[in-house]
Image: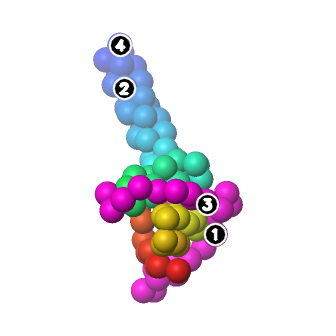
Amino acid sequence: MNWRAFIAGAAAGFTVAYAVQSLRQHQLISSEKALALAKKAFEHAGPISGSWIQTAPETYEKDGIVYNVYKGGICRSEEQYEFIIDAYTGTVIETSRL
């Protein structure tokens, strides 16, 4: 009887751990973290003089795929860029020079 209780408890523990891990992967990152990731991606091309990001995510469709994204911008001395970053993964989806 003890082995059955142990196996049942272990199975329940693994199930809960798996569920918690799945929920963590589907949480939005903060807009501040998204901006930090975007700035890190832009830093390789030169210094950044300013940046901004929208704090509320919105839906965005590209190539038939719907994303939840943050939109923001990066400024350099003479150039300005707008970026779209995935609100779950922090991956820059699109950039455009203004």
Residue at the outermost right position: 56
Q: Of the residues shown, which amino acid type is indicated by label 1?
A: Glu
Q: Residues within 10 Å of mark 3 (few under 14, many from 20)?
A: many
Left/right of residue 75 with respect to residue 56 in the rendered view: left
- Please name the residue that numbered disc 2 is placed on: 10
16 or 41: nearer the eye? 41
Q: Of the residues shown, which amino acid type is indicated by label 3?
A: Ile
Please report whichever mark, 4 or 3, sits nearer to the chain's N-terminal start: 4
Q: Are marks 1 and 3 in contact (CB under 8 Å)?
A: no
**Residue name at image x 53 percent, y 80 percent:** 98
Q: Residues within 10 Å of mark 2 (few under 14, many from 20)?
A: few
Query: Which label sits on residue 2?
Result: 4
Check residue 23 for magenta coloring.
no
Please report whichever mark, 3 or 2, sits nearer to the chain's N-terminal start: 2
- Please name the residue that numbered disc 1 is placed on: 58
- Colour scheme used in the picture? rainbow
